[in-house]
Image: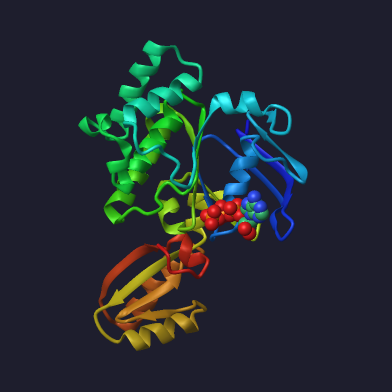
């Protein structure tokens, strides 16, 4: 059963339509929600949490209606907001214990879960220091920990890699993948970077101007964009011409010839063509495009 479903979900603000008849089904796993700034990602999350009403259409989380069952949904969901929202004068431990108590955990369980969760996100001795002195990466980890501390069934992470350097991004992406892989908690994670979500998501939903552009499994995204890279010992111009004559679309990338891999027969055509030209085949390998390239963006 889908964990999140929306049907014709629409949210209008006076000056803009943030979501425009959005219909999606999200199955368990890591789901990437991709869109440029202002695409409607945060608005969708707030509606799913029952914090903001839809203008029309509907949404369900675990089959519960977001318009009526907000409190029950929020008990079962963890939420990491996009913007910095942490108090600077308390420690990570104090803050996360507080959030755990707010979720209804008894004092002892809250302390134990907090210690486990902060360790899981990679905060150790620093967890006793005031959050005000933390780096952006450490603050993002505290935000992630408070989303996980009450052992939710889904976490919704709004731009968790925002403001992080490349190493911090990689670490955060790995942590997110582990939430699903090790604990079986479904993750809905937003980003404006297609390339980074492609690396960790089982399924990717792309929205633009509040409208659905595409929703499919990550493997399907990349399968439709696979290519075959060919390198020959000499005479690459003649080989390219012969491949074109055989009906293939050939692109040049320096010494390499790149062909769309839409059919396995492409391998045979390349092998036969290269043999007929009497040149050596140095390389024949599958190239994997990034989703971002499919959308013509250079973001990976
Ligand atoms: N409370 C609000 N009042 C009026 N307009 C809003 C409100 N919240 C969002 N919007 C508008 O709705 C559109 C979608 O905003 P949203 O924050 O959902 O986008 P986003 O994809 O999360 O982008 P970002 O990453 O920049 O937050 C934007 O045009 C935004 O200005």
Q: Quadrant of ligand 1?
A: bottom right
Q: Position of residue 289 (x, y in %)?
A: 42, 63
Instruction: Name the residue at 47% across, 60% down.
Output: 291
Instruction: State the colouring used for the structure image.
Output: rainbow
How many numbered marks are there?
0
Q: Position of residue 166 (x, y in %)?
A: 30, 56
**279 up-or-down from 86: above or below:** below
* Residue that sits furthest to the right in the current view: 56
Q: Position of residue 76 (x, y in %)?
A: 55, 25
Q: In the rendered view, does 47 fall on the left or right side of 264?
A: right
* Residue that sits furthest to the front in the current view: 89
Instruction: Name the residue at 39% across, 27% down.
Output: 96
> Which quadrant of the figure has residue 252?
bottom left
- The quarter of the picture where the C terminus appears is bottom left
Q: Is residue 37 visible?
A: yes
Q: Is residue 40 visible?
A: no
> Which quadrant of the figure has residue 283?
bottom left
Q: Nearer the viewer, residue 122 or 177?
A: 122
Q: Position of residue 83 (x, y in %)?
A: 47, 47
Q: In the rendered view, does 36 fall on the left or right side of 162?
A: right
**12 up-or-down from 252: above or below:** above
> Which quadrant of the figure has residue 269?
bottom left
Q: In the rendered view, does 7 fall on the left or right side of 216?
A: right
Q: Nearer the viewer, residue 236 or 186?
A: 186
- The quarter of the picture where the N terminus appears is top right
Instruction: Name the residue at 50% across, 70% down.
Output: 296
Q: Nearer the viewer, residue 228 or 134?
A: 134
């Amino acid at each position: 059963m889908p964990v999140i479903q929306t049907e014709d979900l629409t949210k209008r603000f006076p000056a803009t339509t943030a979501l425009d008849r959005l219909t999606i089904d999200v199955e368990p796993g890591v789901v990437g929600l991709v869109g440029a700034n202002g695409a409607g990602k945060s608005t969708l999350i707030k509606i799913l949490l029952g914090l903001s009403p839809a203008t029309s259409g509907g949404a369900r989380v675990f089959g519960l209606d977001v318009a009526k069952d907000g409190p029950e949904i929020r008990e079962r969901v963890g939420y990491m907001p996009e913007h910095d929202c942490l108090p600077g004068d308390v420690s990570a431990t104090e803050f996360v214990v507080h959030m755990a108590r707010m979720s209804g955990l008894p004092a002892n369980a809250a302390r134990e879960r907090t210690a486990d969760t902060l360790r899981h996100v990679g905060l150790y001795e620093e967890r006793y220091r005031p959050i005000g002195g933390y780096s952006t990466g450490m603050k993002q980890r505290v935000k992630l920990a408070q989303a996980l501390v009450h052992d939710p069934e889904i976490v919704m992470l709004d731009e968790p890699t925002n403001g992080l350097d490349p190493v911090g991004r990689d670490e955060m992406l790995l942590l997110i993948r582990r939430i699903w892989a090790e604990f079986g908690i479904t993750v809905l994670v937003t980003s404006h970077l297609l390339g980074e979500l492609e690396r960790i998501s089982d399924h990717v939903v792309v929205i633009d101007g509040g409208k659905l552009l595409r929703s499919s499994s990550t493997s399907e995204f990349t399968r439709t964009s696979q290519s075959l890279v060919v390198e020959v010992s000499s005479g690459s111009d003649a080989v390219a011409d012969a491949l074109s004559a055989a009906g293939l679309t050939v692109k040049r990338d320096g010494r390499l010839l790149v062909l769309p891999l839409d059919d396995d027969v492409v391998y045979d055509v390349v092998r036969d063509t290269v043999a007929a030209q009497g040149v050596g085949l140095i390389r024949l390998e599958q190239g994997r495009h990034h989703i971002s390239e499919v959308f013509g963006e250079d973001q990976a």
